[in-house]
Image (tube, rainbow, N blue to C red):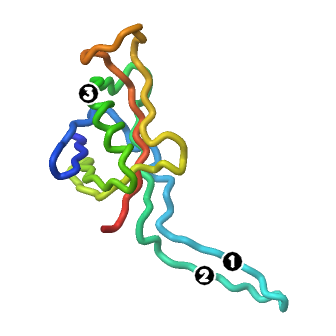
Amino acid sequence: MAITLSDGTTTINLHEDLYWEDEFTWDPVEQSAERTVTGALIVDVNAKISGRPITLRPENDMSAWMARSVLEQLRNWAAVPAKTLTLTLRGTARTVMFRHHEGPAVEPAPVIHYNDTDAADRYTITVRMMEVQV
């Protein structure tokens, strides 16, 4: 199933073999627990409204190769502070932005390194985003 990312004007197709690494590690509930000076336990709990991480990465170095043009578009979008995009994954559209606070939002690795660059060069790309409310 296709994976697309769009800013409303430009749409790129991400490789369908990318997998959502942190799909099941995010907890939709936020909780804090604190003891008072009397020893009573105060628990605050609520549903998280947004911020679900969506890390798309190739399974290994031999999968999900993408063209340099895809990498360049991702890097251009990631260079815009607070840029929101529409990610369509498994038929569901989500509003996302890049996660810059956890390392590189777009992390490429060339499949084969060449001294010069060419539009036909292929890369494996990890993309770190988070779902946001608009």
CB within 8 Å, label 1 to label 2? yes
Q: Tell me the kind of residue under disc 3.
A: Ser
Residue 120 location in percent, x, y?
25, 15
Q: Earlier in the sequence, mark 3 or mark 1?
A: 1
At 42% from the left and 37% from the top, the residue drawn is 106
Residue denoted by label 3: 69
Q: How crowded is mark 1: few (under 14 residues within 10 Å), some or many (20 or more)?
A: few
Q: Which of marks 1 and 2 is nearer the N terminus?
A: 1
Residue 123 position (above or below residue 2): above
Residue 90 position (above or below residue 29): above
Is 55 or 110 nearer to us in this picture?
A: 110
Image quadrant assignment for residue 109:
top left
Residue 115 numbered mark, or none: none
Is 75 or 42 nearer to us in this picture?
A: 75
At 37% from the left and 54% from the top, the residue drawn is 97
Secondary structure of the residue carrying numbered label 2: strand
Residue denoted by label 2: 44
Residue denoted by label 1: 33
Is 90 or 114 nearer to us in this picture?
A: 114
Q: Which of marks 3 and 1 is in front?
A: 3
